Amino acid sequence: MHRMNCVLMSALLMIADGLIVKGPSGPLVAPLGSSVVLPCYVDELSSVEGLEVEWKRTDSKTLVHLFQDGESQAESQHKDYQDRAHFFTEEIQHGNFSLRLDNLRAEDEGQYTCNVYIQQESGENVVQIKVDNVERLRVSGSSRSISASVGEDVTLNCSVDSHITPEDFEEVSWKKTDEDKDIMVLLFQNNEALPDSAHERYTDRVEFFTDEIPKGNFSLRLKSVRTEDKGVYMCQVFAGGLSANTTVVLEQLGFSVLHIMVLILCISASGSALLLFCLIYCRSTTEDTVFRLQMFLVFCPSLLMFLAFVLWGFSEGSLSETLSCCALYFLRPLLLLWASPFMSNFTGTIKSLILKYSYVAEYLVLSLVVYSALFTSAWQKLLSYTAFDRAVIIALFVIVFVCCLCKIIYILVTEVGKKSGRIIKIFNVVADMTFEILPTLQFVLLFYTFGSAGAEFIIIILPVLLMMTNDRWFFRCRVKLNCSFSAIRTTMLIFIIVTNVAMISVYIFTLENKTDAIGWACVIVFLQILWMVMKFTDVTFGFLRLSRDFHRFVPVYVFGSVGVVLLNSAALITELILKTVNGDRMMADLRFTVFPTECLFAIFVLISAFFPSAIAKCLESCQNIVKSRQTPDSRSQENQNTAEMSPLNTEVQGENQLHSVESQT
């Protein structure tokens, strides 16, 4: 309630027909934006029957308010005074006809006449208002820094004192100001909060205290505090040509329960991977025990990392980052099983399914997850595209979904339903044809979704990408140049890798530092490499086909099952600590680490299938060098231990394996 200063100067009595109407003895002085009471009363009022009270501007005769027929006649007021001028209704029966004028304006200055009519008597009183034109806009916040744990809700204080009412403020904004450029947290404009104005980092996490806004309280509630929320926030107010601001500091944040759980899971994942590696390869164990330990090594660290990324997503990560990393770690045991040296321990149907479909299942399911997330991201931007581009993007998504679903349906029908016949064969041909164009569509989809190219891009690059997967070119090279199978396969592998690198490079350079877009590029590259593995091991691939039962090397498997887990758990722990301590991340997106390391593993698996004899000779040479440096006694002991450690038996099958592959063509 604004303070009202009344300066009493002299008594003014107006007598008319015996009715004495009293008022103030001098002008009323009040500041802009305040409320002021214009006194008008009589000492005695015998009855309200026939009472009429009329307040008017003395100079313009503008009707300010009217009491008639026993009630206020608000509809009779001039529009400038509607909702601002009020009688004290319950006091009228006691002879109090005073008027309260709210939200005082500069143009309200002047004289007001209170006319009272009752039966045959009447009287009037004149009241003068003087407006204090001193304008003010003061914004205050917290004098101390605010601390909060991650996951908690916190209130950033901002109070406004002004001669202008809050509903007439032009703008109130909250911004984070300690970064390279100000980040909009929340905006109040045109007498309403605008949640859509918030940066994506603060979407659905910030709000005003709506009931407090009329009191000038623009404090901000920040929900589910994250580590990157640490910093300086500014509350800035614009009103009546004036502006003022205050700052609030959100101090260093501590580890939340989710953070501690992520740390525990990462340490457990890396610790279990190292422990299982030591139990399998550094001590003598029976074959059955080794097999069980190998199964634990395949599933346990990956499951722990999957849970760690789930919790990371709840506390810090973006949706696309979390979804991609979780999907990968949920599915990667399938590729590990396929690449493991203990494949020979499986028998019958289980071995056949793992050899034929484990990595295929990972590719298909991961692709569907990726396409779904990309479609969600693209859907939010469709309105910014032209009608043609919107149609192209929707068509591309439909095609890639159909391609994956065709392959999945064919596998389920033939392997689970045990169906066969001409229709199934036709469906197989369709599934293979659509599957061949997936790598091309993935690149086109990536470029289009993030606006890195237009429609002309397809016309230029589509033929090149389709040729990349066409083995007929390489068959002609073998026939014309009389090259070996190994040389042709190697050439095709190099060509595909170089093309992928070139496409991703063009994609990244045409973007304007879009973190999410580059993160998706890392995911697409892994899908491309996994597609190559499927391509070269497909039984219908012809003369370039590799045997699915190629020699698996222990170092490659150890890198995938232990090395990749150690690298990614270390990256996640580092990100977590840096965000908690500094409020900033070392990497903008964990996909920059997770998927490149997985790409390396997939490439190593592919290379081991391409050059089994060369790798076997290299490993044998390394073992011989190590043995030659040992004493005869230690060498004897080492040979004995090696004989007992079945997982480290790396029988050289090189040349026989290669001849077997070529003979199958």
Image (cartoon, rainbow, N blue to C red):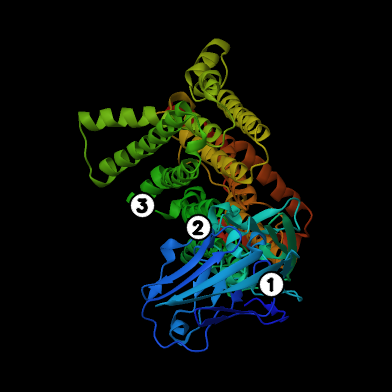
Q: Is any part of residue 35 visible from this angle? A: no
- Whether tag 1 and tag 3 are in contact, CB under 8 A, the answer is no
Instruction: Give the CA distance from mark 1 to mark 3.
Output: 89 Å
Judge left or right: residue 554 versus residue 586.
Answer: left
Q: Point out the residue furthest to the top here.
A: 480
Mark 1 = which residue? 30
Q: Residues within 10 Å of mark 1 (few under 14, many from 20)?
A: many
Tell me the kind of residue under disc 3: Ile
Residue at position x 73%, y 54% in the image: 627
Residue at position x 67%, y 77% in the image: 4
Residue nearer the viewer, 441 or 660: 441
- Residue 632 place in picture, x, y as percent: 76, 59
Which circle's residue, 1 or 2, is located before the other in the chain?
A: 1
Q: Could you tell me which secondary element the residue under label 3 belongs to? A: helix
Mark 2 = which residue? 79
Residue at position x 62%, y 69% in the image: 216
> In the image, which disc is placed on residue 350?
3
Residue nearer the viewer, 478 or 562: 562
Q: Quadrant of residue 569?
A: bottom right
- Residue 220 place in picture, x, y as percent: 61, 67
Which circle's residue, 3 or 2, is located before the other in the chain?
A: 2
